[in-house]
Image: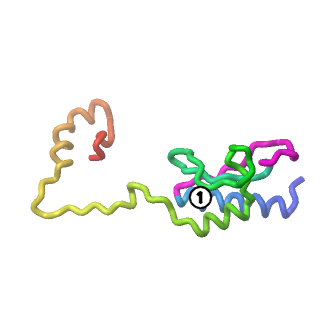
């Protein structure tokens, strides 16, 4: 049976996971089941796109885990969200041709055949 402190810890983990996701990261918990393991019950923070470790504990024999939940929460509060392409503002300058418009017109028949979305160039 689960007690109140277990629910509270789970709620904190869930919030930290949401905070990480909001910033473009993923909070991962060690899957070690042996309570004697150095990484048992510890975390690491990885880039959500590349799975590269961005924050880890020390003395974890290269596994990347080792963070306490408190350490992870603190880092997530201080770390700014990573930049992604959706943060880039695109400005259309009047008088210049819309390069993507020409490509959309050229590919109109292709997109209906393959039901593709964006082209490889981002248009």
Q: Please identify the quarter of the rendering in which residue 14 is found.
A: bottom right
Residue found at x 21% / y 37%: 107
Query: Which residues fall within the magenta stretch?
Result: 24-39
Instruction: Determine whether, in the image, residue 100 is placed left or right of residue 73.
Output: left
Q: Which residue is farthest bottom?
A: 78
Pinpoint residue 117: horizontal percent, then vertical percent.
33, 41
Residue 39 image point, x, y percent: 77, 48
Residue closest to the far left: 95
Q: Residue at x 29, y 40 (%)?
A: 119
Q: 52 or 61: which is nearer to us?
A: 61
Q: Residue at x 21, y 38 (%)?
A: 108
Q: Element type at marker 1?
A: helix
Give whichever of 51, 13 is nearer the camera: 51
- 108 and 10: which is toward the camera: 10
User: Residue 106 falls in which quadrant of the image?
Assistant: top left
Q: In the rendered picture of this protein, how many numbered marks are placed on residues? A: 1
Chief secondary structure of the magenta portion: loop
- How crowded pointer 1 is (Cα within 10 Å; few <14, some 14-19, many 20+) is rated as many
Which residue is at 42% across, 56% downward?
84
The image shows residue 12 at horizontal and vertical percentages of: 72, 63
Q: Position of residue 58 (x, y in %)?
A: 72, 54
**Residue 33 forms part of the magenta stretch:** yes
* Residue closest to the far right: 1
Q: Which residue is mark 1?
A: 20
- Residue 35 lies in the magenta-colored region: yes
Q: In screen coordinates, is 41 left or right of 81?
A: right
Q: Is residue 72 left or right of residue 5?
A: left
Left or right: where 47 falls relative to 27:
left
């Amino acid at each position: 049976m689960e007690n109140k402190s277990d629910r509270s810890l789970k709620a904190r983990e869930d919030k930290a996971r949401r905070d990480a996701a909001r910033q473009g990261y993923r909070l991962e918990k060690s899957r070690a089941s042996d309570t004697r393991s150095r990484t048992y019950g510890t975390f690491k923070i990885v880039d959500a796109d590349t799975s590269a470790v961005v924050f880890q504990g020390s003395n974890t024999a290269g596994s990347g885990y080792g963070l306490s939940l408190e350490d992870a929460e603190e880092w997530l509060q201080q770390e700014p969200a990573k930049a992604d392409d959706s943060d880039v503002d695109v400005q259309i300058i009047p008088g210049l041709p819309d390069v993507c418009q020409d490509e959309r017109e050229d590919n109109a028949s292709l997109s209906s055949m393959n039901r593709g979305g964006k082209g490889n160039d981002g248009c």
